[in-house]
């Protein structure tokens, strides 16, 4: 075998490999953070030290979280970045992927220069569906909270003037669009500001998708408020008010 | 000594007995602090009464630590005993999204008594504590449950008791899963014969639904495109159609159908969603149609399959004799004139036949998966077409082709009967001429002759240009086009059709279209294929229709009277053609054999479905 | 060996049986009404709930069986139309619910300053097995009718109670079991209808901002509830937010008891619990050393049955330690007086059987106290016990007397036929207007009615009296028959058909003239004095100077005057009582003259 003949070929191969190698990390680096599956996270928790942060509100985090998590609400994440150690993996999670994306907690972490930032793929539902346990530090016992469907909301509020709408979404989302007369206390502040709510009126709790309002309503019911909630949240309201049909 | 030992023994026993557990420096039981009625009298009367507090709250081992609040007990794991429920619950939406635990619904866990006959009522009471759904409470199901009926659906029967999924909350967010879920749930009870009979309900409703277009498309796997049970009957407020609040009450049907259909006349709602075509009283038109179509099919196939069988027998026996004696028709051909080819079919006719084959197969393969949607091959075939919508498109394209062919043939017939120049003069002569496809006395004679020949009672009749079975093929298709084409056009766009005909006509149209299709397909694939290609004389295939020409000897043998006539009129010369080229022969063979094989395969599939 | 075994096994049992508990209370989490922890991060605006906090370990239902907590149930239901004597005579007693039914919401605000919480301040008085929630907030929630008498209010805009906004007053453990409890702050919360927040404010654990009701303006705020701001860093809490256990006193200090009972006792009996005036205080005894919770009753010591000695009579049932328990019983740790008395007194046994210890040993009371109550013009005018000075308010009773005064003496019937004893008493007498009921009984008239009648009269006697600061004040009073006649006629005019005037006799109009009749009941209250036993060194005990301390015409033991006719006394004999408005107290005992000591 005359190796000289093969040398250009070898160089070409090496070049190709090098190129491939180089572009892969940069593709990942463009996004900055990576996704991690529930099973993988479970392995990591058993084997190594990492920082696990639950970016839901404090009420939700103390009600159910993966054992060993910290509770830093998404909206307050940027301010609390300095308290997170940089020498180990950082895993963020909440009830889905959308919330870490929406308030950009993971992006903030990457921007601040953290190296190993992960987001739990599909969030806590994936962790639960995989059968792993959660811990409850301060459980909010759920109360029987009745709900009103989007199609009936206007009529209901007209018939029951003692109700006032409480919007527990983040401030910016509230300001973009909210129901008439709605008060706004974002859920991550609710445990500090609930006494601003009127005691002599009933509350209609409204959130984004309808997944968080039940817990918020139960919390407020324990504080002595009379509560109901909007089934499906603002998403249901929007699709009702835009007249979406049910099929096709 | 003994006495001392004895008293020592007693002392030890006494003192050991008086030794209270370590943690009761305060001498407490759970109920001393947790003194509510739920934990004392309530618990003692509950189903868990035989378990102590610690059997569930097993992590509270250090009483002092618990009482001072230094140890926070963790939530009880009910799955320790209720393992199956816990496993089901892992998939529950309430757990995955809302993080409910057992005790959040079962708030009465300490006082809960055993659920027996009233489990459905309790389920309803429990779910409605958060989910209003007043409309359920007025429905037929609820009324039955609350009266103690154990068959009727309560919340858990449709939504799942512990494994409640998310998609049924939103038809708009999860259209496919939701509709398939609903349908599966409704069918699970309404297809159960025993249950339906117990409750004086029709046990065939599901079957009849599946006979309709909605059911067929849903059955072949495209549930999102058509109405499922819940689309018409709604989900919670399922009421009989006599109730003015019901979504299927005649007054409400327009709005109900209007959730998917737009631009229809109000007659549209006369469409029957799952009619019983055996019911003469309620659905007379459908019943008559059913009887007629079934009769037609039965009669046609009985006659022609008998005819085919007898023909085959005669033909095969004859061939066998000839083979035995070493005589084959080809050996009789000696002169060159014998295998000179003459034309039987013009280019136009050959092209039209190919188009006919293509469109026919398209129609059959796009249509039959709907008709026999339950068959395993139905979904495969639909998938090959790219899904039901694509199949529908091609079906309609092929139908248009067929209609164009029909129109062309009709025009040609008219031109044959009323040629330019002659007009109406002598059209009856032309009608009954040997070149006409119209039946005449000779055909009747031929039928009688063939039957005699089948039974060795006579010679094979001598045929002119068109044999009676070719005429039947022509007329069957011609007539069939009215039935199948007419019904197909009505079904093409049901909303537009409602401006012409009332909705129930579409039920009839579906039945006609469906049965006529079976008639046509099966006839073509069995009788036509036999008559033309599988008859032992011609086996495996007669490529005449593709090449358009055949040898004069074949003409002499198969159509002797035509031969005589042509020779007498001296028209043979102008019909002489070149022997078909190799490419033509190959194309013919390919198209022909492919069609034959495909047809046979489809026949096997259809017969299989019909028989099982 | 058996002994060794017994001892070793008994030792742990012995330690636990003493029941004293750990030396310092554990640091505990405060809990809110729902039982949730209050930490700097969570629920930090919620008031703490004694029932959920203390009651988490100490059985709350047993504790509120105690008389302090159950007090008020019977007073709530008392029919004001069957009262014998005017309520104002004993201002520290709880008033009946004034509205005929029990409009508890307002009644709590009026009477809670006399009550530690729990009992009627928290619950309806139902049996626990009726299934009806007893807690007032829960009961209010299920009440559908606005006419339910339990849940009305005179002051709220819609006439309905507001327990949901106000909460209830739970038994406030720290009121007693803490040093430095601020009763005034707690009562301010009660007046603002901030029932739920009262315990938090009183204990000083946090500041409460916001009020349900503003008494000065009469406005209600139902929308925003009051908010607590805990003083996490003031040393009462551990760094993580637990309440520091060293604040909690198992041994209740005297200051706790005196915060309510101090003023009450001064008013009733002129006693002050000070070392200079009381030998027991001087010896370092706390209230709780003698007023112990009865152990024999169900619930034991936790049942907080701290008996009211005046009510019982048999001290053995109430857990109250009497003189006998320490001074006479075997094993008592106080000096035994049997020998001393035998030496000092002739007929010692006779005297010991006839006289209560306090009869001789309680001879001077340091506080002004109260003695006379003049309701004759509708406005309560009080006069102190030491020198009948005009009091501006009941609180004047706590002021130190110019000179300590001697108590009166009365005969107390002991229960269970154990005879009778002479005891020192503080005498409370009144004159007042009442009316006869259909059955002929006499009930006091409401002060507003009498004031209305007084305004219609002219020429009512005015008297001058010295007030507590030494100035002379003028006060109108009904002193003469003419005054009585005018008032009785005025009351007739106001629609009272059978008015009566009660002082030394019952006076009423018969055919336009005032006639007198004997009193059908005693128009005075004699409250035994059990405290302020003088230190013997002061040598003021009766008999210290010999028999003539008592057995003498001039000795006050037999001859102290009792005022019977208040008005006449004020007009004619003020400030030194003499006949016929007053007479010597020995007449009540059946003695016409001072018995000789021979």
Image: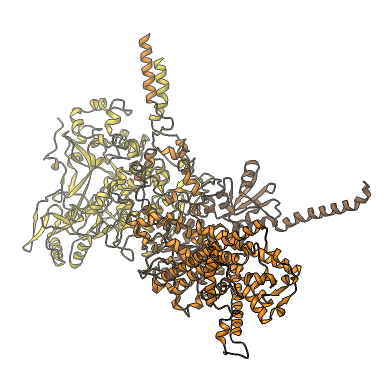
Q: Nearer the viewer, residue A141 or C461?
A: A141
User: How far across and how far down the image is residue C391, in percent?
Assistant: 28, 54
| Count of marks placed on residues | 0
Chain C: drawing colour:
yellow
The structure residue drawn at horizontal position 23% and vertical position 33%, both measured from the top left corner, is C543
Give the image's coloring scheme.
Answer: by chain
Place residue C286 in its image quadrant.
top left
In this orientation, which residue lies closer to the viewer: C530 or C576?
C530
Asked if residue A234 lies left or right of residue C321, the reply is: right
Location of the N terminus of chain C (image quadrant): top left
Q: Can residue C532 be seen here?
A: yes
Residue A180 visible, this angle: no
Seen from the viewer's position, the closer of residues A220 and C384 is A220
Q: Tell me: A225 left or right of B552.
A: left
Q: Report which colour depicts chain A.
A: brown
**Picture quadrant where residue C173 is located:** top left
In the image, residue C338 sits, relative to residue B384, either above or below, namely: above
| Chain letter for the orange part | B
In the rendered view, tell whether residue C429 sits above or below residue A240: above
Q: Position of residue B378 (x, y in %)?
A: 56, 60
Which residue, as the protein is rendered here, is positioned at the far left?
Answer: C511
User: How far from the left and from the top, in percent, is residue B390?
Assistant: 60, 68
Q: Where does the image place residue C278, in percent across and percent down from the top left?
A: 32, 38
Q: Quadrant of the C terminus of chain C?
A: top left
Q: Which quadrant of the structure image shows residue B46?
A: top left
């Amino acid at each position: 075998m005359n190796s000289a003949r093969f040398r250009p070929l070898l160089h070409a191969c090496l070049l190709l490999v090098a190129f491939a190698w180089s572009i892969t990390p940069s593709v990942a680096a463009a996004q900055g953070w990576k996704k991690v599956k529930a099973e993988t996270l479970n392995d990591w928790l058993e084997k190594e030290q990492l920082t696990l942060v639950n970016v839901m509100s404090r009420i939700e985090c103390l009600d159910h979280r993966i054992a060993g998590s910290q509770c830093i609400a998404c909206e307050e994440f940027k301010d609390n970045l300095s308290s997170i150690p940089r020498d180990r993996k950082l895993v963020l999670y909440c009830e889905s992927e959308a919330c870490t994306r929406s308030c950009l907690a993971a992006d903030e972490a990457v921007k601040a220069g953290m190296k190993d930032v992960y987001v739990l793929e599909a969030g806590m539902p994936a962790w639960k569906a995989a059968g792993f346990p959660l811990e409850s530090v301060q459980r909010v016992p759920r109360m029987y909270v009745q709900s009103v469907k989007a199609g009936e909301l206007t009529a209901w509020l007209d018939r029951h003037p003692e109700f006032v709408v409480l919007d527990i979404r983040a401030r910016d989302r509230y300001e973009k669009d909210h129901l008439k007369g709605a008060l706004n206390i974002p859920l991550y502040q609710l445990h500090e500001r609930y006494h601003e709510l009127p005691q002599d009126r009933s509350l209609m709790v409204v959130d984004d998708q309808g997944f968080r309002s039940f817990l918020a309503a139960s919390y407020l019911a324990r504080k002595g408020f009379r509560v109901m909630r909007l089934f499906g949240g603002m998403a249901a309201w929007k699709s009702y008010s835009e007249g979406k049909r049910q099929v096709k | 000594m003994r006495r001392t030992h004895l008293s020592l023994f007693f002392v030890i026993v006494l003192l050991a007995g008086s030794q209270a557990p370590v943690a009761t420096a305060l001498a407490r039981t759970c109920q001393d602090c947790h003194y509510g009625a739920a934990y004392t009298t309530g618990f003692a009367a509950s189903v868990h009464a035989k378990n102590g507090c610690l059997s569930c709250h097993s992590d509270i081992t250090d009483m002092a630590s618990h009482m001072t609040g230094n140890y926070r007990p963790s939530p009880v794991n009910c799955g320790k005993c209720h393992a199956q429920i816990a496993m089901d619950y892992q998939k529950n939406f309430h757990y995955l999204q809302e993080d409910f635990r057992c005790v959040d619904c079962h708030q009465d866990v300490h006082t809960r008594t055993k659920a027996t006959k009233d489990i459905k009522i309790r389920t309803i009471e429990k779910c409605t504590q958060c989910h209003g759904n007043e409309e359920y409470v007025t429905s037929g199901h609820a009324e039955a449950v609350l009266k103690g009926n154990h068959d009727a659906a309560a919340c858990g029967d449709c939504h799942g008791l512990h494994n409640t999924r998310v998609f049924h909350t939103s038809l708009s967010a999860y259209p496919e899963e939701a509709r398939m879920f609903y349908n599966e749930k409704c069918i699970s009870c309404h297809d159960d014969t025993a249950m339906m009979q117990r409750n004086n309900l029709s046990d065939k409703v599901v079957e009849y639904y599946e006979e309709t277009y909605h059911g067929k498309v849903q059955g072949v796997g495209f549930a999102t495109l058509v109405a499922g049970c819940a689309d018409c009957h709604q989900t919670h407020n399922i009421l009989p159609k006599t109730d003015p609040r019901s979504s299927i009450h005649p007054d409400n049907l327009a709005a109900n159908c209007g959730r998917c259909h737009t631009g229809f006349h109000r007659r549209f709602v006369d469409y029957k969603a799952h009619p019983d075509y055996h019911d003469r009283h309620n659905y007379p038109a459908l019943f008559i149609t059913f009887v007629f179509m079934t009769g037609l099919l039965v009669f046609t196939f009985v006659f022609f399959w008998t005819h085919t069988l007898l023909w085959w027998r005669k033909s095969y026996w004859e061939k066998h004799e000839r083979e035995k004696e070493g005589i084959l028709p080809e050996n009789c051909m000696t002169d060159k004139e014998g295998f000179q080819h003459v034309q039987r079919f013009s280019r136009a006719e050959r092209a039209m036949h190919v188009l006919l084959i293509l469109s026919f197969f398209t129609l059959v393969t796009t249509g039959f998966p709907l008709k026999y949607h339950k068959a395993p091959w139905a979904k495969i075939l639909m998938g090959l077409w790219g899904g039901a919508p694509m199949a529908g498109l091609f079906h309609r394209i092929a139908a248009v082709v067929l209609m164009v062919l029909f129109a062309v043939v009709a025009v040609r017939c008219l031109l044959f009967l009323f040629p330019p120049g002659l007009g109406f003069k002598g059209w009856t002569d032309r009608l009954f001429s040997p070149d006409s496809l119209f039946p005449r006395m000779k055909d009747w004679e031929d039928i009688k002759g063939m039957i005699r020949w089948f039974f060795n009672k006579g010679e094979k009749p001598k045929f002119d240009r068109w044999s009676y079975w070719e005429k039947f093929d022509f007329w069957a298709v011609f007539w069939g086009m009215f039935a199948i084409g007419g019904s197909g056009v009505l079904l093409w766009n049901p909303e537009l059709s409602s401006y012409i005909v009332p909705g129930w006509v579409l039920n009839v149209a579906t039945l006609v279209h469906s049965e006529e299709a079976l008639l046509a397909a099966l006839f073509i694939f069995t009788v036509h294929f036999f008559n033309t290609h599988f008859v032992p004389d011609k086996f495996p295939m007669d490529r005449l229709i593709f090449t358009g020409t055949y040898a004069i000897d074949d003409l002499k043998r198969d159509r002797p009277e035509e031969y005589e006539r042509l020779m007498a009129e001296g028209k043979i010369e102008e019909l002489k053609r070149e022997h078909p080229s190799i490419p033509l022969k190959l194309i013919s063979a390919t198209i022909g054999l492919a069609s034959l094989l495909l047809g046979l395969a489809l026949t096997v599939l259809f017969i299989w479905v019909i028989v099982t | 060996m058996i002994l060794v075994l017994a001892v070793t096994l008994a030792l742990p049992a012995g330690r636990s049986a003493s029941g004293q508990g750990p030396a310092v209370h554990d640091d505990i989490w405060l809990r809110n009404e729902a039982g949730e922890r209050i930490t700097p991060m969570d629920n930090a605006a919620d008031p703490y709930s004694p029932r959920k906090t203390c009651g988490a370990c100490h059985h709350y239902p047993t504790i509120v069986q105690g008389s302090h907590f159950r007090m008020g149930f019977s007073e709530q239901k008392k029919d004001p139309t069957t009262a014998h004597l005017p309520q104002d005579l004993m201002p520290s007693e709880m008033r009946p619910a004034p509205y005929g039914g029990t409009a508890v919401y307002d009644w709590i605000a009026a009477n809670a300053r006399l009550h530690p919480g729990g009992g009627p301040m928290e619950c309806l008085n139902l049996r626990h097995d009726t299934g009806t929630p007893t807690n007032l907030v829960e009961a209010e929630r299920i009440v559908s009718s606005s006419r339910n008498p339990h849940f009305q209010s005179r002051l709220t805009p819609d006439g309905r109670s507001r327990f949901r906004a106000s909460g209830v007053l739970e038994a406030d453990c720290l009121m007693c079991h803490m040093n430095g409890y601020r009763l005034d702050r707690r009562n301010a919360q009660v007046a603002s209808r901030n029932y739920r927040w009262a315990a938090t404010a009183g204990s000083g654990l946090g500041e409460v901002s916001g009020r349900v009701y503003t008494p000065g303006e009469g406005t209600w705020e139902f929308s925003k509830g009051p908010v607590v701001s805990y003083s996490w860093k003031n040393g009462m809490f551990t760094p993580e937010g637990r309440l520091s256990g060293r604040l909690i006193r198992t041994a209740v200090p005297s200051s706790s008891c005196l915060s309510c009972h101090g003023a009450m006792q001064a008013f009733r009996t002129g006693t002050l619990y000070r070392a200079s005036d009381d030998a027991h205080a001087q010896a370092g005894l706390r209230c709780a050393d003698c007023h112990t919770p009865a152990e024999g009753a169900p619930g034991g010591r936790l049942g907080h049955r701290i008996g009211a000695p005046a009510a019982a009579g048999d001290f053995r049932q109430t857990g109250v330690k009497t003189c006998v328990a320490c001074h006479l019983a075997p094993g008592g740790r106080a000096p035994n007086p049997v020998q001393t008395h035998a030496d000092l007194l002739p007929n010692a046994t006779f005297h010991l059987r006839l006289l209560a210890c306090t009869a001789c040993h309680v001879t001077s009371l340091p506080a002004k106290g109260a003695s006379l109550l003049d309701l004759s013009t509708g406005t309560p005018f009080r006069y102190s016990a030491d020198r009948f000075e005009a009091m501006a308010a009941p609180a004047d009773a706590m002021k130190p007397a110019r000179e300590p005064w001697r108590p009166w003496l009365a005969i107390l019937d002991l229960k269970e036929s154990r005879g009778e004893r002479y005891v020192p008493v503080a005498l409370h007498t009144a004159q007042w207007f009442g009316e006869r009921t259909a059955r002929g009984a006499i009930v006091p008239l409401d002060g507003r009615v009498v004031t209305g009648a007084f305004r219609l009269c002219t020429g009512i006697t005015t008297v001058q009296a010295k007030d507590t600061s030494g100035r002379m004040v003028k006060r109108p009073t009904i002193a003469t028959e003419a005054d009585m006649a005018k008032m009785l006629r005025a009351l007739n005019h106001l629609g009272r058909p059978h008015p009566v005037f009660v002082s030394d006799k019952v006076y009423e109009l018969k055919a336009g003239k005032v006639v007198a009749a004997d009193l059908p009941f005693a128009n005075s209250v004699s409250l035994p004095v059990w405290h302020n036993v003088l230190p013997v060194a002061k040598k003021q005990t009766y008999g210290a100077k010999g028999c003539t301390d008592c057995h003498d015409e001039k000795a006050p033991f037999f001859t102290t005057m009792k005022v019977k006719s208040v008005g006449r006394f004020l007009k004619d004999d003020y400030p030194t009582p003499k006949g016929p408005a007053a007479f010597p107290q020995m007449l009540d005992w059946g003695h016409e003259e001072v018995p000789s000591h021979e």
